[in-house]
Image (cartoon, coloured by chain):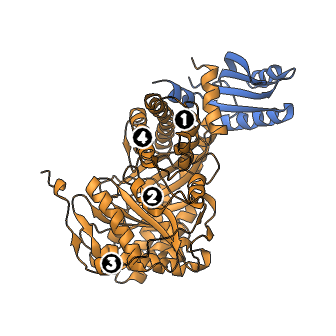
Chain colours: A blue, B orange
Amino acid sequence: MKKYIITVVGKDSVGIIARVCTYLSENHANILDIAQTIVSGYFNMMMIVDPEKCEKSIEAMADDLDRIGEEIGVRIHLQHEDIFNMMHRI
Amino acid sequence: MIQISEVLETNHMIEKENLDVRTITVGISLLDCMDADLSVLREKIYRKITRVAKDLVPVGESIERDFGIPIVNKRISVTPISLVGSGACRCPEDYVSIARTLDEAAKAVGVNFLGGYSALVSKGMTEADRNLILSIPEALSQTEFVCSSVNVGSTKTGIDMNAVRLLGDIIHRTAELTADRDSLGCAKLVVFCNAPDDNPFMAGAFHGVTEGDAVIHVGVSGPGVVKNAVDQCRGSDFEVLCETVKKTAFKITRVGQLVAKEASRRLQIPFGIIDLSLAPTPAVGDSIAEILESMGLECTGAPGTTAALALLNDQVKKGGVMASSYVGGLSGAFIPISEDQGMIHAVNAGALTIEKLEAMTCVCSVGLDMIAIPGDTPATTISGIIADEMAIGMVNAKTTAVRLIPVIGKGVGEVVEFGGLLGYAPVMPVNTFDCSSFVNRGGRIPAPIHSFKN
């Protein structure tokens, strides 16, 4: 199963998680885990998602999430989990 | 399961510390293109390059998107053209026509450089090698993407001083033919000792004859990440410093390994090696000099610089070797002047001279790199500088290289602007004492005694 990591970084405000989760559920992406933290006043969220049932391509979803991020004033990235696995696991 | 702190650390490296993969380079053998007819040869070369590398740029871009890691350059290296053209080229002009074909092929597939307009003459030159070397100034002035290199020595063979002497003239001629662009042609010409067959970095990349038909090499980068890590251990002892650099190098290299395997899978071209070199860019915070300064030097060039660089180079290798299944190429810290903001600053501050740079090249890859010198520097002096650098490589059994730019019409203290990743550089003074009687002797310098290991 290919898993992807979504990160959301920016100023905290109401409805960020709701907005991202709504988009993911509309596109049939299954959320496996969510973690969030505040680092020097900034909202940081990470989601692990399984995009297996998604009809859209990963590129299209990355573009959509970029756009949503711009609308709500945060930066949203969608990345394959392997970059983190490679860097932090032997 | 991945932790949020790990995800944030990786993305911080990418966004704030300029972590990137510097290059995916596809090596392509052109040996099967050889032909006695020049136009047939050129046609075969064009067809093979555009067939093998046609998906390189789009695949590179899709990997960037998928993993969220920038891949700055997509490049091609080919079999040394002196060999490929040996059956068809009768004069230097014939070789220039191959350079134009290579340029067209590079443009067609959208890569930003193509290396391998090269000759390997560490013991002697064939007529073909000589013709290729003589064609370099014209080839580099008439093309945009072609990079050239000449290997003039090795630990096993000694140094071909005839080639060293000839290249002093060739570098000068190349500078003259590209004088209208601040002698930019010389930025695409490297003279090597012990040149590796699998180097992915330009301008010295070529696809050695020991390699397979096509292969993918990846060059990683990340001076900014190392600098940041070194900043975190101010005041601690060398053990802590070394451990920090090593762990950071491991992480950086793992990203390169991932990209290399992925590019290999998607392009269906075998994976060759990861080159562990720390390669700076002119961007602020992406500098080798700044790492050395962060270790505790007031300015790069100060006493202690060579030791700091030796330490850095060694720890990068120790961390990187464990992160990748195959390591090769140049693998070390690059110390170009024009491509490194901290180096430029050190030269302007009067802390860094060519002589100190020469000492630094004894402990790191690659050599005297991207150094602008006065345009009126005699060709024999350039040959002398090359000979010194080649001797360091030969005796220490390591790769060394020279990429000097005698800037026509400019003198010490003036600034040359190359643009893009090549950056800008102050023209540095060169020792003006004469060495012409030495370099004009002709012949070879024999291999050093420790090369006889059989």
Q: Which residue is mark 4?
A: B311
Question: Can residue B86 be seen in the rendering of this structure?
Answer: no
Check whether the beta carbons of the residues at disc 3 and disc 1 lie within 8 A of each other. Answer: no
Who comes first in sequence, dot 3 or dot 1?
3
Q: Residue at x 69, y 27 (%)?
A: A6
Residue under label 1: B230
- For label 2, the residue is B357
Q: Amino acid at mark 2?
A: Leu
Query: Element under label 2?
Result: helix
Residue B349: percent from left, percent from top: 59, 58
N-terminal-most mark, 1 or 2: 1
Q: Amino acid at mark 4?
A: Leu
Query: Which residue, given by chain and number where applicable, does mark 3 sit on?
Result: B130
Dot 1 falls on which chain? B
| Quadrant where the N terminus of chain A is found in the figure | top right
- The quadrant of the picture occupied by the C terminus of chain A is top left
Q: Amino acid at mark 3?
A: Arg
Along the horizontal axis of the image, is B270 left or right of A15?
Answer: left
Q: Chain of mark 3?
A: B
Mark closest to the chain's N terminus, 4 or 3 = 3
Between marks 1 and 2, how big is the CA–CA gap? Answer: 22 Å
Select label 3 or label 2 by which is in front. 2
CA distance separating discs 4 and 3: 40 Å
Residue at mark 2: chain: B
